[in-house]
Amino acid sequence: MSDEGTIFRVSGPVVTAIGMEAGMYDVVRVGNEGLMGEVIELHGDKAVIQVYEDTSGIRPGEPVRNTRETLSVALGPGLLTQIYDGIQRPLPTLEEVMGVFITRGVDADAFDLERKWTFEATVAVGDEVGSGQVIGTVQETETIVHKIMVPPGKGGIIKSIESGDFNVTHTVCTLEDGTEMQMMQKWPVRTPRPYQQKYAPDTPLVTGMRILDFLFPLAKGGTAGIPGPFGSGKTVTQQSLAKYSDAQIVVYIGCGERGNEMTEVLDEFPHLIDPNTGKPLMNRTVMIANTSNMPVAAREASVYTGITIAEYFRDMGYDVALMADSTSRWAEAMREISSRLEEMPGEEGYPAYLSSRIAEFYERAGRVQTLDGDDGSITVIGAVSPPGGDISEPVSQGTLRIVKVFWGLDAGLARQRHFPAINWLNSYSLYPQSLNQWFRDNIAQDFPEIRTEISGLLQVESELQEIVQLVGSDALPIDQQLTLEVARMIREYFLQQNGFHEVDAFCSIEQQYAMVKAILTFQESAKNAIAAGAQLDDVVNVPARSNLIRARFEKGYIDVIGEMVEKMVEEIAATVEEN
């Protein structure tokens, strides 16, 4: 048997080849056009291949060639600002070759191999370097320094190293054992990159979204799932996280999303300005666009391509945020390939290994000590699009078993134009316990207690609403009517946030704390005034309260909030004297 074989059978993206020597996960070239595929099953002399391109027109008897390589991504300077398809072909380069429609059998290098980068060595001849150690740097974009590392598994004493302007395939460093190192390295996508140890998550990923940071925080190196029906805001929420979260690198995977949605992202992102640096957001972003009309096998690979690129930047000591939108489409690709392989279906036709694949993906998140001794993290945020918004289906359930943060989007809230439409009664985060110390040290000592109080008020409101729907709010005692007013203030003033408003789209945690304290101050002042004989309507309608609520859309709000709260307290106290 040789590296050459022939096609025996074709079933959609799944092709069976015979007469070829192959190992599991070998990359092969299928047919006369040389379509890229990967061996996923072996039966005697038959190799079952999933093809990452459209297979229409391919017939039995055409040749299949084994490349003897596994599906790998190229890692090196030039990754940032790129827009790739699921198997790391840059879309702008593909467009030059084939026009606006993707044709088959076209190969493209992951980045420009001719472009020169300025490499500055950080080690010298005679130094001993180990696996994953940084040997030099390249200023890749205005904001990000790209660290060139010894590939995992390599190491030794440096025989020669040179600084200067080179392309990524030029040998910049040679070890005494003859190992040559370039600025580019390759890594198989299905193998997690190594690290020294994983830490417990104890630092929050600041997102600037009040409901997320305050009530359901996510840790750096954590995992979150955003299930929700169509039109409830999954994509906008993820885009907002990509824009405003305090991660240093963003990897955005558009996995099986609608073409027009992906186009919007691709059009919008290059024009966005990073609020932290004032430079274009694309300077620290890698995008993987795999739309719903692209071949399903490449959709399955796109998630692994994205997480491997994220691990590479994590190994440099960066905090990476990875958005996967949406993992349901990834699971559907697995289901389609599984049915073509005639595997025994599990629940709702998904393969039996669905849960373990989802778990493998999310387990690659985490905050770690890198091989070089730095700290780096990958935070994974996966959107799930359950059919009809039913989160009892297998993908949602498989995700919820793994992730520690659940941001449940609600179609009812979206219809009421309450955005972000995250339901505060069924969402949860398992991180507050480990993050509370950070909030106490960096924001305020009573931060966790205030969070509990706000959650309690929203819970009480939901119980009172059931009574209100039966008998009306006027039948409630005055203190419960006040509780309803306070909860409405939490919902409309604090939880609602305009993702497209230049000021309100991002809210610092310090400002969030000040806003919540303002709500609780209102509650306390109102209680005292009503106890002293003031009318609820008079207390609720004081002008200073309306001004406080409206002013959150103005710049510099955090500087004036204290004065506004004092004014509100004075006006509430004055309602007692009027009565």
Image (cartoon, rainbow, N blue to C red):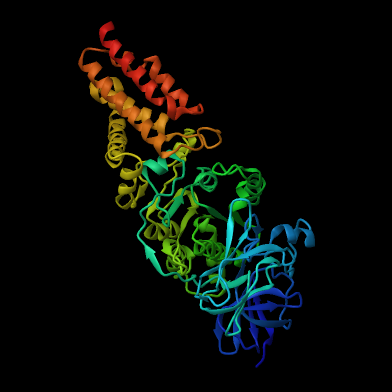
Q: Residue furthest left?
A: 531
Residue situated furthest top in the rendering: 578
Q: Residue at x 54, y 58 (%)?
A: 329
Left or right, 462 with respect to 274, comes to left
Q: Is residue 471 visible?
A: no
**Rendered-image quadrant of the C terminus:** top left
The answer to whether residue 104 is above or below residue 533 is below
Q: Give residue 377's position: percent from left, percent from top.
A: 45, 59
| Horizontal side of residue 334 vs 437, given as left or right | right
Q: Is residue 472 above or below residue 26?
A: above
Label total for image: 0
Q: 231 and 98: which one is in front?
A: 98
- Res 312 quadrant in image: bottom right
Q: Quadrant of residue 50?
A: bottom right
Q: Quadrant where the N terminus lies? A: bottom right
Q: Quadrant of residue 37?
A: bottom right
* Residue 554 spot, x, y in % from top left: 51, 26
Tell me the residue at 32%/27% (across/down): 486
Vertical order, 15 against 102 (above or below)? below
Residue at image point 29% right, 42% down: 448
> What percent of the width, then of the height, locates residue 420?
47, 39
Relative placement, left or right, of 41 versus 360 is right
Residue 573 appears in the rendering? yes
Q: Position of residue 85 (x, y in %)?
A: 65, 61
